[in-house]
Amino acid sequence: MKKLHLSHFRIVAMLLVVFSLLGCDKLGINFNKNTSSPVGNRPELDCIIANDFYAVHFSAYIQPGKDEVSKDAKAAFVPYCQQIPRPGKMFFTADLIDRDIRTTPIGIRIVEVEKTGQKAPDDIREIRTVAEIPSKLYPRGAVEAQAEIDKNGDYVLYLMIGEAMEDDDKFRVPLEVGVDPKALTIKEIALISGGIVLFIGLIFLAYFLTTKRKAA
Protein backbone atom coordinates (compact mmCIF):
# COMPACT_ATOMS: atom_id res chain seq x y z
CA MET A 1 0.00 0.00 0.00
CA LYS A 2 2.87 2.39 0.75
CA LYS A 3 4.33 1.83 -2.73
CA LEU A 4 0.98 2.65 -4.35
CA HIS A 5 0.62 5.72 -2.14
CA LEU A 6 4.00 7.17 -3.14
CA SER A 7 3.52 6.34 -6.82
CA HIS A 8 0.22 8.13 -6.88
CA PHE A 9 1.65 11.30 -5.40
CA ARG A 10 4.43 11.26 -7.98
CA ILE A 11 1.75 11.31 -10.69
CA VAL A 12 0.00 14.22 -8.98
CA ALA A 13 3.29 16.13 -8.77
CA MET A 14 3.98 15.57 -12.46
CA LEU A 15 0.50 16.81 -13.36
CA LEU A 16 1.08 19.94 -11.28
CA VAL A 17 4.20 20.71 -13.31
CA VAL A 18 2.39 20.11 -16.62
CA PHE A 19 -0.55 22.32 -15.70
CA SER A 20 1.80 25.05 -14.47
CA LEU A 21 3.65 25.10 -17.78
CA LEU A 22 0.42 24.97 -19.76
CA GLY A 23 -1.02 27.81 -17.75
CA CYS A 24 2.07 29.96 -18.28
CA ASP A 25 1.91 29.36 -22.02
CA LYS A 26 -1.77 30.34 -22.24
CA LEU A 27 -1.15 33.45 -20.15
CA GLY A 28 1.60 34.53 -22.51
CA ILE A 29 4.51 33.89 -20.15
CA ASN A 30 7.49 32.83 -22.22
CA PHE A 31 10.61 31.50 -20.49
CA ASN A 32 12.57 31.43 -23.75
CA LYS A 33 14.27 34.82 -23.94
CA ASN A 34 15.99 34.08 -27.27
CA THR A 35 13.29 35.57 -29.52
CA SER A 36 13.86 37.55 -32.69
CA SER A 37 12.25 40.81 -33.76
CA PRO A 38 8.73 40.62 -35.24
CA VAL A 39 9.95 42.63 -38.20
CA GLY A 40 11.87 40.55 -40.73
CA ASN A 41 11.86 37.26 -42.58
CA ARG A 42 11.45 35.09 -39.46
CA PRO A 43 9.29 36.82 -36.83
CA GLU A 44 9.07 35.68 -33.21
CA LEU A 45 5.84 33.98 -34.23
CA ASP A 46 6.59 30.33 -35.04
CA CYS A 47 3.74 29.40 -37.39
CA ILE A 48 4.42 26.21 -39.35
CA ILE A 49 1.74 24.96 -41.75
CA ALA A 50 2.15 21.64 -43.54
CA ASN A 51 0.41 18.97 -45.56
CA ASP A 52 1.67 15.50 -46.53
CA PHE A 53 4.27 16.90 -48.95
CA TYR A 54 5.07 20.53 -48.16
CA ALA A 55 5.66 22.79 -45.17
CA VAL A 56 6.06 26.56 -44.79
CA HIS A 57 6.79 29.13 -42.11
CA PHE A 58 3.84 31.47 -42.47
CA SER A 59 3.17 34.99 -41.21
CA ALA A 60 0.53 37.64 -41.91
CA TYR A 61 0.70 41.37 -41.23
CA ILE A 62 -1.98 44.06 -41.24
CA GLN A 63 -1.02 47.48 -42.54
CA PRO A 64 -1.17 49.70 -39.43
CA GLY A 65 -2.93 53.04 -39.27
CA LYS A 66 -1.05 56.33 -39.31
CA ASP A 67 -1.50 56.78 -35.56
CA GLU A 68 -0.01 53.33 -34.86
CA VAL A 69 3.02 54.00 -37.08
CA SER A 70 3.69 57.41 -35.55
CA LYS A 71 3.80 55.90 -32.05
CA ASP A 72 6.06 52.92 -32.75
CA ALA A 73 6.71 51.83 -36.34
CA LYS A 74 8.26 48.46 -35.44
CA ALA A 75 5.64 47.52 -32.88
CA ALA A 76 2.86 48.43 -35.34
CA PHE A 77 3.78 45.56 -37.68
CA VAL A 78 2.61 42.61 -35.60
CA PRO A 79 2.93 39.09 -37.10
CA TYR A 80 -0.08 36.80 -37.02
CA CYS A 81 -0.54 33.16 -37.91
CA GLN A 82 -3.98 32.00 -39.10
CA GLN A 83 -6.13 34.07 -36.74
CA ILE A 84 -6.16 37.75 -37.69
CA PRO A 85 -7.98 40.30 -35.51
CA ARG A 86 -9.43 42.66 -38.13
CA PRO A 87 -9.75 43.27 -41.87
CA GLY A 88 -7.53 45.64 -43.80
CA LYS A 89 -4.64 45.62 -46.21
CA MET A 90 -2.62 42.50 -45.46
CA PHE A 91 0.83 41.21 -46.31
CA PHE A 92 1.53 37.48 -46.35
CA THR A 93 4.84 35.64 -46.29
CA ALA A 94 5.39 31.90 -46.68
CA ASP A 95 8.98 30.72 -46.26
CA LEU A 96 9.42 27.46 -48.16
CA ILE A 97 11.05 24.83 -45.95
CA ASP A 98 11.54 22.33 -48.79
CA ARG A 99 14.31 23.65 -51.05
CA ASP A 100 13.27 21.42 -53.96
CA ILE A 101 10.11 23.42 -54.71
CA ARG A 102 12.11 26.63 -55.02
CA THR A 103 12.74 25.57 -58.61
CA THR A 104 9.02 25.04 -59.24
CA PRO A 105 6.72 27.91 -60.29
CA ILE A 106 4.17 28.82 -57.62
CA GLY A 107 0.96 30.76 -58.13
CA ILE A 108 -1.06 32.42 -55.38
CA ARG A 109 -4.80 32.67 -54.87
CA ILE A 110 -6.55 34.32 -51.92
CA VAL A 111 -10.24 33.50 -51.72
CA GLU A 112 -13.10 34.10 -49.33
CA VAL A 113 -14.74 30.81 -48.37
CA GLU A 114 -17.69 29.38 -46.52
CA LYS A 115 -17.39 26.29 -44.33
CA THR A 116 -19.63 23.39 -45.38
CA GLY A 117 -19.12 21.06 -42.42
CA GLN A 118 -17.97 18.24 -44.70
CA LYS A 119 -14.60 16.49 -44.82
CA ALA A 120 -11.65 17.95 -46.77
CA PRO A 121 -11.29 18.81 -49.58
CA ASP A 122 -15.07 19.50 -49.65
CA ASP A 123 -15.06 21.29 -46.29
CA ILE A 124 -15.19 24.75 -47.87
CA ARG A 125 -17.00 26.50 -50.70
CA GLU A 126 -15.40 29.42 -52.52
CA ILE A 127 -17.37 32.67 -52.44
CA ARG A 128 -15.06 35.04 -54.31
CA THR A 129 -11.46 35.54 -55.35
CA VAL A 130 -9.84 38.37 -53.42
CA ALA A 131 -6.43 38.34 -55.11
CA GLU A 132 -4.52 36.21 -57.62
CA ILE A 133 -0.85 36.25 -58.56
CA PRO A 134 0.43 34.35 -61.64
CA SER A 135 2.91 31.50 -61.20
CA LYS A 136 6.58 32.38 -60.92
CA LEU A 137 9.75 31.10 -59.32
CA TYR A 138 10.77 32.00 -55.77
CA PRO A 139 14.44 30.93 -55.73
CA ARG A 140 15.08 32.52 -52.31
CA GLY A 141 12.19 30.59 -50.82
CA ALA A 142 10.12 33.58 -49.65
CA VAL A 143 6.67 33.64 -51.26
CA GLU A 144 5.03 37.01 -50.71
CA ALA A 145 1.59 38.37 -51.45
CA GLN A 146 -0.70 41.17 -50.41
CA ALA A 147 -4.45 41.66 -50.54
CA GLU A 148 -7.17 43.99 -49.35
CA ILE A 149 -9.38 41.98 -47.00
CA ASP A 150 -12.46 44.14 -46.60
CA LYS A 151 -14.53 42.17 -44.07
CA ASN A 152 -14.41 39.55 -41.34
CA GLY A 153 -14.83 35.91 -42.27
CA ASP A 154 -13.06 32.78 -43.45
CA TYR A 155 -10.41 32.92 -46.17
CA VAL A 156 -7.89 30.58 -47.75
CA LEU A 157 -4.52 31.46 -49.21
CA TYR A 158 -3.59 28.87 -51.83
CA LEU A 159 -0.06 28.20 -53.02
CA MET A 160 -0.57 26.60 -56.45
CA ILE A 161 2.58 24.52 -56.80
CA GLY A 162 3.58 23.56 -60.34
CA GLU A 163 0.57 22.50 -62.40
CA ALA A 164 -1.43 22.07 -59.17
CA MET A 165 -3.13 18.96 -60.53
CA GLU A 166 -3.31 17.17 -57.16
CA ASP A 167 -4.95 18.47 -53.98
CA ASP A 168 -1.61 18.41 -52.13
CA ASP A 169 -0.17 20.76 -54.79
CA LYS A 170 -2.91 23.25 -53.92
CA PHE A 171 -1.29 24.13 -50.62
CA ARG A 172 -3.90 25.53 -48.28
CA VAL A 173 -3.44 28.18 -45.60
CA PRO A 174 -6.82 28.70 -43.86
CA LEU A 175 -7.30 32.16 -42.39
CA GLU A 176 -9.84 33.55 -39.92
CA VAL A 177 -10.30 37.31 -39.98
CA GLY A 178 -12.04 39.09 -37.11
CA VAL A 179 -11.02 36.79 -34.26
CA ASP A 180 -8.78 37.22 -31.24
CA PRO A 181 -5.47 35.41 -31.98
CA LYS A 182 -4.90 34.92 -28.24
CA ALA A 183 -8.32 33.39 -27.58
CA LEU A 184 -8.49 29.70 -26.72
CA THR A 185 -9.95 27.40 -29.37
CA ILE A 186 -12.75 24.92 -28.60
CA LYS A 187 -10.23 22.06 -28.72
CA GLU A 188 -7.92 23.83 -26.27
CA ILE A 189 -10.81 24.56 -23.90
CA ALA A 190 -11.93 20.92 -24.06
CA LEU A 191 -8.37 19.70 -23.45
CA ILE A 192 -7.83 21.98 -20.47
CA SER A 193 -11.27 21.17 -19.02
CA GLY A 194 -10.65 17.44 -19.35
CA GLY A 195 -7.25 17.82 -17.73
CA ILE A 196 -8.73 19.75 -14.80
CA VAL A 197 -11.39 17.07 -14.26
CA LEU A 198 -8.70 14.37 -14.34
CA PHE A 199 -6.54 16.35 -11.94
CA ILE A 200 -9.40 16.80 -9.44
CA GLY A 201 -10.18 13.09 -9.73
CA LEU A 202 -6.59 12.21 -8.88
CA ILE A 203 -6.67 14.53 -5.86
CA PHE A 204 -9.77 12.74 -4.55
CA LEU A 205 -8.13 9.37 -5.24
CA ALA A 206 -5.02 10.45 -3.33
CA TYR A 207 -7.20 11.55 -0.40
CA PHE A 208 -9.11 8.24 -0.48
CA LEU A 209 -5.91 6.17 -0.52
CA THR A 210 -4.39 8.23 2.29
CA THR A 211 -7.53 7.89 4.44
CA LYS A 212 -7.73 4.16 3.75
CA ARG A 213 -4.04 3.70 4.62
CA LYS A 214 -4.44 5.51 7.95
CA ALA A 215 -7.49 3.43 8.81
CA ALA A 216 -5.67 0.13 8.02
Image: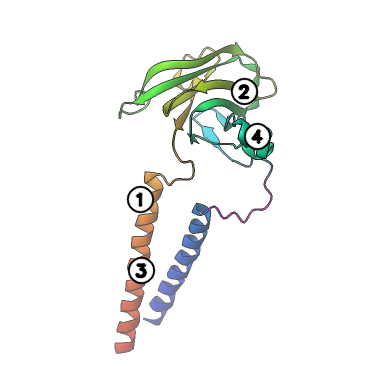
Of marks 4 and 2, which one's residue comes earlier in the chain?
4
Q: In the rendered structure, are the residues bearing label 1 and label 2 in contact, judged by CB atoms less than 8 Å apart?
A: no
Q: Quadrant of the C terminus?
A: bottom left
Q: Nearer the viewer, residue 185 or 181?
A: 181
Q: Which residue is mark 2?
A: 143
Disc 3 versus disc 4: distance between alpha carbons? 51 Å
Span colored in magenta: 28-35
> Is 216 placed left or right of 8 in the picture?
left
Q: Nearer the viewer, mark 3 or mark 1?
A: 1
Q: Which residue is mark 3?
A: 202
Q: Nearer the viewer, residue 153 or 50?
A: 153
Disc 3 versus disc 1: distance between alpha carbons? 18 Å
The answer to whether any part of residue 54 appears in the image is: yes
Q: Amino acid at mark 4?
A: Val
Disc 1 versus disc 4: distance between alpha carbons? 39 Å
List x then y, in percent, for residue 54.
54, 28
Of marks 1 and 4, which one's residue comes earlier in the chain?
4
Of marks 3 and 4, which one's residue comes earlier in the chain?
4
Q: Which residue is mark 4?
A: 69
Of marks 3 and 2, which one's residue comes earlier in the chain?
2
> Compared to 148, does 11 lie above or below?
below
Of marks 1 and 2, which one's residue comes earlier in the chain?
2
Q: Categorize mark 2 by other alpha carbons within 10 Å: few (<14), some (14-19), many (20+).
A: many
List x then y, in percent, for residue 194.
35, 56
Q: Which residue is mark 1?
A: 190
